[in-house]
């Protein structure tokens, strides 16, 4: 089974090499993501700089475009509560040659009439894009799929995607049917009314190396009929919410599954990264490795074991006004048995690129085998320029030892 899973994922995630491809920079070459996509051809890459892009994107009738953001913590596509953030309407022309990677997808609002009421964050009709390294959060749908909706023989592939805190009148997180759904290293958490739902899917799908937890009513729901039964394989995943099998439907529990609290950084602030105590660490498919060379973890975010000190930053808001307060919870983890001393330095990079000191450098000693969390708030000056800031912190020993660092983007906005 492990060989079959790995072979399937490897084949699906390999993108074909295309000669004469063009890179379209946003906002350098085109002012918006939509304009960049409309200007692209098969094999082109639309490369998006850090920032917040207020758009409701309709994917063009072109396969093989790769839409790449700078990273989910610094590059945001904001639907402005108007419609779905990204909508694939093109049908089966969109294959696994199409990629969306490196964004946070938020503030989508899918409203009637049908089918515009489906898929608040991402709506996929009869298409098969690869979605990877994404956070899909705080989206709403008046019908199915607050986070992601798939229908009409859709065969999407999700890899390292966090579907968190989305809401719908029905099926809050991920909703789909009709095709084969492949989710690898996906975290589905905090969605209302539920996490993952598929119906009438002859081929069903596969959840592998996933975490499903903290959803309101259910984690996984399948619904099928005698004419259209629904099947789902689950392997090496933490399913910590109820599983509902309705009608002609069945979950095939393969090897490596657990049912445990995943132990995350700060679920109250939607930070579902893993703490060192998590049972999801080194519990994924044993034939797959994380970037640090250890056995792969479950969920969208792996726990980096390259060093014995770990730093996480969890922002309590990512938009503040001049004169407001930015709150951040710092999490520091020492996996050594003995106490470790280090310095903490925090700076913010202003919209003009200049750094400004926020905290430190200050010395700190963390006891052995200890995880600590501390909330720190900072006033945003009334004269702070509007725009995107990067908040980053490092722990280490000057002048040359860096244990770990973390960062996120936040925006100072006007009234």
Image (cartoon, rainbow, N blue to C red):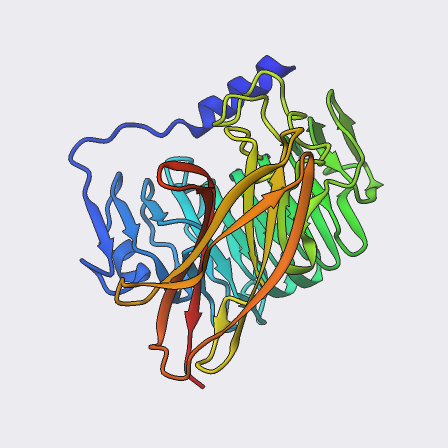
Whether residue 359 is visible here, answered yes or no, is yes
Q: In the picture, which quadrant includes the C terminus?
A: bottom left
Q: Which is nearer the eye, 328 or 17?
A: 328
Check the image and name the residue furthest to the left: 20
Q: In this view, does 318 lie above or below 92?
A: below
Q: Is residue 208 above or below residue 398?
A: above
- Residue 266: x %, y % from top left: 67, 53
- Residue 402: x %, y % from top left: 42, 38
Q: Is residue 344 above or below residue 324?
A: above
Q: Is residue 154 above or below residue 358?
A: above
- Residue 367: x %, y % from top left: 67, 39
Q: In the picture, which quadrant includes the N terminus?
A: top right
- Residue 264: x %, y % from top left: 68, 45
Q: Say left or right for 241 vs 23.
A: right
Figure quadrant of residue 278: top right
Q: Which is nearer the eye, 269 or 399?
A: 399
The residue at the point 40 percent across, 59 percent down is 347
Q: Say left or right for 294 vs 217.
A: left
Figure quadrant of residue 2: top right
The residue at the point 35 percent across, 71 percent down is 387
Figure quadrant of residue 56: bottom left
């Amino acid at each position: 089974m492990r060989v079959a899973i790995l072979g399937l994922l490897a084949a699906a995630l390999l993108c074909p090499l295309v000669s004469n491809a063009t890179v379209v920079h946003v906002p350098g070459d085109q002012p918006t993501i939509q304009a960049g996509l409309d200007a692209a051809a098969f094999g082109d890459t639309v490369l998006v700089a850090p920032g917040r892009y207020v758009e409701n994107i309709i994917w063009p009738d072109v396969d093989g475009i790769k839409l790449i953001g700078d990273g989910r913590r610094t590059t945001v596509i904001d639907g402005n509560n108007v419609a779905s953030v990204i909508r694939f309407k093109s049908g089966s022309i969109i294959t696994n040659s199409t990629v969306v990677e490196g964004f946070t997808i938020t503030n989508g609002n899918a409203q009637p009439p049908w089918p515009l009421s489906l898929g608040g964050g991402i709506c996929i009709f009869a298409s098969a894009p690869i979605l990877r390294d994404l956070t899909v959060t705080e989206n709403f749908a008046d019908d199915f799929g607050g986070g992601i909706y798939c229908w009409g023989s859709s065969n999407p592939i999700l890899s390292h995607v966090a579907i968190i805190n989305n809401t719908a009148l029905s099926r809050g997180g991920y909703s789909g049917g009709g095709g084969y759904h492949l989710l690898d290293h996906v975290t589905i958490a905090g969605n209302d009314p539920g996490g993952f739902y598929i119906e009438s899917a002859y081929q069903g799908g596969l959840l592998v190396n996933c975490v499903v937890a903290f959803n309101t009513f259910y984690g996984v729901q399948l619904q099928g009929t005698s004419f259209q039964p629904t099947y789902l394989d689950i392997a090496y995943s933490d399913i910590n919410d109820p599983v509902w099998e309705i009608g002609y439907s069945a979950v095939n529990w393969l090897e490596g599954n657990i049912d445990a609290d995943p132990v995350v950084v700060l679920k109250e602030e939607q930070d579902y990264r893993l703490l060192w105590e998590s049972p999801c660490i080194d519990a994924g498919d044993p034939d797959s490795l994380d970037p640090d060379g250890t056995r792969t973890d479950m969920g969208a975010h792996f726990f980096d074991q390259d060093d014995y000190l770990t730093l996480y930053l969890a922002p309590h808001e990512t938009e503040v006004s001049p004169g407001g307060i930015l709150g951040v919870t710092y999490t520091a983890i020492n996996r050594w048995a003995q106490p470790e001393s280090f310095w903490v330095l925090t700076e913010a990079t202003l919209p003009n690129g200049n750094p400004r000191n926020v905290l430190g450098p200050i010395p700190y000693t963390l006891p052995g085998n200890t995880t600590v969390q501390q909330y720190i708030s900072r006033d945003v000056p009334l004269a702070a320029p509007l725009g995107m800031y990067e908040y980053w912190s490092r722990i280490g020993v000057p002048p040359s030892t860096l244990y770990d660092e973390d960062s996120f983007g936040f925006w100072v906005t006007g009234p």
